[in-house]
Image (cartoon, grey):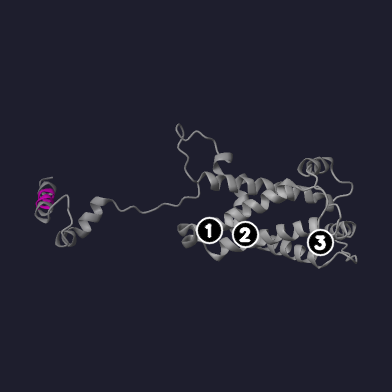
């Protein structure tokens, strides 16, 4: 359970940082907090890329942590029998989407070069409803963009909507005074109750035939009914 908690925490905070870092593609000028976050997250510098001898940009810690956390959450569903039994396609599909997003993003940053200026021009055009398709972006970016579009479209209809629970949780929006005040849901409708005494009165003979214990035997119940009838007659 501790590892699940750690993996989920790393995933959520890394995904949040990655989301905020992407604001630099949609804003001009770039907000100061995005620039600061970018510098803090990418302070590591690598040497020379062995493939083509080109230097690569700083490694973002959240990129690596996000992929590690996603891989752990995916493998956990495969290797733990109980989780594998409970897992549905709706549990795997978001993991594959976000894994593909992270993988294509890492490829674009570290291995497959794309024109970042053209990407920003396209992103700002989409945000301002004035889309343009600059040349030289590359297929890998459009795969990344397609996966993001699928995730955004799928988000409101999936388990990912637990994000709303952060803002709609009763523990955040209701007074924590249930020990002193009884809170009744105003939308609750009246429910017709069926007490155990009424249940046994209705099914006593069948319960006795089935060998189930009853509080009153049929004879005792008959005597009680006769006594109540006599009292009623006297009155």
Which residue is more in the foreground, 66 or 155? Answer: 66
Mark pair 2, 3: CA separation: 23 Å
Q: Which of the numbered marks, if any, corresponds to residue 32?
A: none
Is label 1 in a helix, a strand or a loop? helix
Q: Quadrant of residue 33?
A: top right
Report the residue marked by disc 2: 95
Is label 2 in a helix, a strand or a loop? helix
Report the residue marked by disc 3: 112
Q: Which residues are drawn in magenta?
A: 223-229
Q: Position of residue 47 (x, y in %)?
A: 82, 48
Q: Residue at x 59, y 48 (%)?
A: 7
Residue 217 visible somewhere in the drawing: yes
* Mark nearer the N terminus (1 vs 2): 1
Between disc 2 and disc 3, the foreground one is: 3
Please indicate whether residue 2 sits to the left or right of residue 124 in the image: left
Q: Position of residue 191 (x, y in %)?
A: 39, 53
Q: Position of residue 66 (x, y in %)?
A: 67, 51
């Amino acid at each position: 359970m501790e590892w699940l908690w750690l993996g989920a925490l790393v995933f959520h905070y890394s995904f949040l940082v990655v989301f905020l870092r992407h604001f630099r593609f949609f804003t001009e000028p770039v907000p100061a907090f995005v620039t600061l976050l970018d510098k803090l997250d990418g302070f590591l510098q690598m040497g020379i890329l062995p493939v083509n001898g080109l230097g690569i940009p700083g490694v973002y810690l959240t990129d690596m942590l996000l992929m590690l956390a996603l891989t752990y959450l995916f493998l956990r569903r495969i290797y733990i029998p109980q989780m594998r039994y409970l897992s549905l396609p709706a549990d795997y599909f978001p993991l594959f989407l976000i894994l593909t997003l992270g993988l294509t993003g890492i490829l674009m940053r570290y291995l497959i070069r794309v024109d970042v200026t053209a990407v920003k021009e396209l992103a700002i055009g989409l945000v301002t409803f004035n889309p343009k398709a600059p040349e030289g972006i590359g297929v890998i970016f459009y795969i990344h963009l397609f996966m993001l579009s699928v995730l955004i479209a799928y988000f409101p209809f999936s388990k990912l909507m637990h994000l709303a629970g952060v803002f709609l949780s009763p523990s955040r929006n209701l007074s924590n005074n249930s020990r002193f005040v009884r809170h009744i849901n105003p939308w609750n409708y009246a429910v017709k109750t069926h007490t155990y005494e009424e249940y046994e009165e209705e099914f006593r003979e069948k319960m006795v035939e089935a060998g189930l214990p009853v509080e009153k035997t049929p004879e005792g119940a008959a005597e009680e009914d006769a006594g109540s009838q006599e009292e009623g007659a006297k009155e």
